[in-house]
Amino acid sequence: MKNIVRELKQLYKLNYRNIVMFELIYRMVFVVLYSRISISLINYILGICGYSYINIKNIGELMMNPLTYPVLIIIIVIAIIFAGFEMNVLYTGFSSAVHGHKLKFITLIWSSVKRTAYMLLPRNISVFAVAGGFFYLCQSFALNRLIGIENRIADIKNGLFDIKLFTTFFIIITVLIIGFIIMNMYAVCYNIFLNSSGKKALLQGRNFFKKRFIRTLPAYAAVTVLYTAVYYIVYAVIMVIMACLVVLFAKDNLEMALIQVIGRYINLILIYFVSIISIILYSGISVYTFYKYESVDDEVFKPVNIKHDSAWNKRILIIVSVIVLIGTAYNAVDVIRNGNLSAHNTFGGITITSHRGFSEEAPENTIPALELAIDSLADFAEIDVRQTKDGEIVLLHDASLYRTTGKNEYVWNMNYADILNLDAGSGFARKYAGTRIPTLKEALQLCKGKINLNIEIKEGRKDSDFVKNIMAAVDEMDMYEQCMFSSTSYKYLKEVKGYNMNVYTGYIVSAAYGDYFDDKNIDFFSVNSSYLTQDNINRAHSYGKGVYAWTVNNNVEMNRMKRIGVDGIITDMPVYAREVLYGSEKTQSLVSYIRMLLY
């Protein structure tokens, strides 16, 4: 046993720097790009079917659409190619380590590219599929954890598993696929290291597994227990530390919300690293056991010597560097531009929208209110926009300026230069004296990359170029992905779609939805929560329309909205809403326990 541990340690040690560097870069660049490509393809199918997102009620109809299957095939093929190449890199690195060879990074990548090309030949496709399947089998823990923290995906999974026939069918198919992958996983080694063709490699792999599975499976089981235990221990330790810091330094009303949001991000970071660690461990064991127990002439196992002239090495290095830089730059620009946020998430959960900024704590529709909405960790800030006499778009709910500023005049009768001199804060609280009415551009500049916006377009007498000016401001800030638009005016929504069909638009109604279920200018309904029932939400969802409830401020109504399945709530109390909708007894106990320790 000591010899095995020592040999495995040596195996991981020799090329681990290049392997880890590859994993970090490859996952950072290509997984993000793959995710975006996949979601774009899924959204394309959703658009064709007239849906805004996937849920348990429309997934059946989506599967009936013939275009769904080519898209799924494309997504699966890309996923397998991505996985197959990664496995080739790992197997190449560990194969060289077995023979005491330390590969240069460029040699490792180029050797893997050639081997991937060989595996993609028609006669080897079956082995390549096994390699991809083995990759995702090794990632099953990380994938399961990821599904668990993505609310809508978890809801779809739970809904499907409520169907006994589906559950039975899924279990049977899953067991068969896992059994096939495990039985044939060493076929990849025969194909890569011995150049065996597909059928021969599969046969050799099965024979190897039958003879050695008693010796090999315990190693995989031990690694699984090890990294799972490490994951939960590290997660618990980090969460306790973060909870202590939150209790010590955060505002009292933000403690629960912060812990919930921090917990999600810690989960995502740990899943990222655990997925890398697990695949490195599993692939290392596979290569080690193959070389350990395969009794053939050792000469066969010497890594292929790939000779490159210096000019060719430089060209490959440049190509790889350019790919990495493009991918990294794309991700960095995306984060800077959109804050890694999306106003519409295909797989999102119940969103929390802070009403008129954070109007419970600061003057509504002002910069301070938006700053507090950002600090409160709301998913969206809802703002109201109107147009001044001289065509400036400002944040204002009422047609009159009287309630918020004391000026008894309609907004469309005043130029913005005059509105700029009004005090929109002293009527709310003395500390906000001098707060002015901001423009839409100022609000966009503040919120860019920080919080999504639900821009409610208010009806008014001055509406010449109103929608055009709104969309110009959003376009100038390049914030379409962070904004959705709502209005009581169908005309405005139609105009918005005329400028950009891809934006998310909502029709604000008091009760009935009317005959707008099939209307492509409407993606969701914004409805007074007291009029919402399970039946009318189900009907909206069956047409692929979202439902957002307003204005939800108490525990009972928040829980009712959660139970009947709304897509989002608009509330004056975003922090409290997050506690009600996403809080758990475990989190509350953790905070209470830490309070006991500190006090």
Image (cartoon, rainbow, N blue to C red):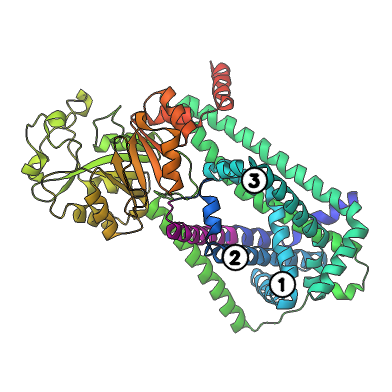
- Magenta-colored span: 26-52
Q: Where is residue 583 drawn, in percent x and y?
A: 51, 29
Label 1 to label 3: alpha-carbon separation: 27 Å
Residue 579 drawn in magenta: no
Q: Which mark is residue 144?
A: 3
Q: Residue at x 73, y 53 (%)?
A: 173
Task: Determine which residue is flagged by label 1.
Answer: 125
Q: Nearer the viewer, mark 2 or mark 3?
A: 2
Mark 3, residues whose alpha carbon is within 10 Å: few (<14), some, or many (≥20)?
A: few
Relative to 240, does residue 146 appear above or below in the rendering? below
**Does dot 2 land on a helix, a strand or a loop?**
helix
Name the side, left or right, on which 265 lies relative to 510. right
Q: Earlier in the sequence, mark 1 or mark 2?
A: 2
**Does dot 1 land on a helix, a strand or a loop?**
helix
Q: Is residue 317 visible?
A: yes
Q: Where is residue 407 drawn, in percent x and y?
A: 8, 32
Relative to 421, does residue 499 appear above or below in the rendering? below
Q: For residue 243, what is the image quadrant?
A: top right
Q: Amino acid at mark 1?
A: Ile
Q: Amino acid at mark 2?
A: Ile
Q: For residue 337, what is the image quadrant?
A: bottom left
Task: Determine which residue is flagged by label 2.
Answer: 73
Name the side, left or right, on which 357 lies relative to 89. left
Q: For residue 127, what is the image quadrant?
A: bottom right
Q: Residue at x 40, y 47 (%)?
A: 545
Considering the whole magenta stretch, tell me its main secondary structure: helix
